[in-house]
Image: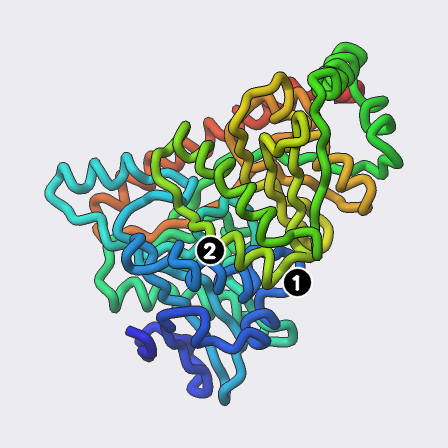
Amino acid sequence: MSSADLAAAPAAASLEVRLVQGIEQIDAGQWDACAGADQPFLGHAFLAALEASGSVSRRTGWLPLHLIVEQEGELLGCAPMYLKSHSYGEYVFDWGWANAYERAGGRYYPKLQVAVPFTPVPGPRLLVRPGSPPDMRAAVARGLLGAAQQLDVSSLHVTFCTEPEWRILGDAGLLQREGVQYHWCNRGYGSFDDFLASLKSSKRKTIRKERARVAEQGLCLETLTGDALTPDVWDTFYPFYRSTVDKRWGKAYLSKRFFQLLGATMPERVVLVMARHGGRCVAGALNLVGDDTLYGRIWGCQQEFEFLHFEACYYRAIDFAIERGLARVEAGAQGQHKLQRGYEPVPTYSAHWIRDPGFRDAVERFLAQERREMAVEIEELRELLPYRNA
């Protein structure tokens, strides 16, 4: 369904809503005008690297079906969307929903997913060109619902959207879900020592000991970006990624070709921390940088060293953010150990449309309870922050 008009498209006769099987069929400049420059994951280059590398395809269970809203050939709104045959690589978990629905005799897959594949990074999902009519995000939302209804899927999931989008989608009838991630906030620090001075004494001492222990083990770390990201660098990094995959999941979502394309097409957005021991690379941490945020994405190592993970993924990220004057470091979900290193709990948002009325009611009751529990959890987590004034 590479180009289908949707019955639930915006009311304005001059607007056309279509589904497109592949980001390369959409003009990069027009897509990026809607996506903006704030976040690298939504850019045409990143999504194209996922598709061109084979990491995202029908074969991998991520069939691209990007939604676009046009007016006289100009792209006014869009959304990165995929027809899914499983729930891997999403990080807003609905396996329990799928199992329950199929035990009851339903068919949960295929479903529609509005997201950046394999990327649990909050950001816009209803992408709109600046200067578009004020209701364009709602128009994109209506287009997504129209696609779900016409394609006869069980459900539509918009994950890691912004809070304003979450409210728009809720008004459109989608069920609302919340989660939690850990982000570090730059409060105008001039140096890492300034950041440490904001912490309680015991936490400050712990971090200093951890950083010193990394150096004592003979480890040297370097931060690579831009022209320094040669093909040899990706050849070295990819086994680190595979090592993490083998330990946790057993299936690599991303191909080596994806990383090579990332370095070739958007090197200025990549921040790669590599660790050496005895002259040999032993670990790496991949980050991407936006206009005001550093996004921690992938960590891998082939040899274990004490506190190296914390140094490469958290402390070096803070160093980089302070040096560049970035507002935040987003370290993703999972791991209360991030709290003790100054990363604060923040809510994340997703929205879900369920076709089956009875199943929808059950999910709605579950989500109402989950939201209450999540609000309590975030408040309790904030009490564990290491800051002196927390």
The image quarter in which residue 332 lies = top right
Residue sitting at 33 percent across and 78 percent down?
3
Helix, strand or loop at mark 2: helix
In the image, what residue type sits under mark 2?
Arg
Mark 2 / mark 1, whichever is N-terminal:
1
Residue 361, above or below 312: below
- Which label was assigned to residue 37? 1
Residue sitting at 59 percent across and 76 percent down?
29
Q: Name the residue that disc number 2 marks.
A: 257
Structural crowding at the residue carrying mark 1, measured as other residues with C-alpha within 10 Å and reported as few (<14), some (14–19) or many (≥20): few
Front-most of residues 145 and 44 = 44
**Residue 273 percent location from the top left of the image:** 66, 39
**Residue 326 percent location from the top left of the image:** 76, 46
**Residue 335 percent location from the top left of the image:** 54, 25
- Count of marks overlaid on the render: 2
Q: Is residue 298 left or right of residue 291?
A: left
Q: Is residue 307 left or right of residue 321?
A: left
Residue sitting at 59 percent across and 69 percent down?
32
Residue 180, above or below 78: above
Front-most of residues 213 and 126 = 213
Residue sitting at 69 percent across and 57 percent down?
268
In the image, what residue type sits under mark 1?
Ala
The C terminus, quarter of image: top right
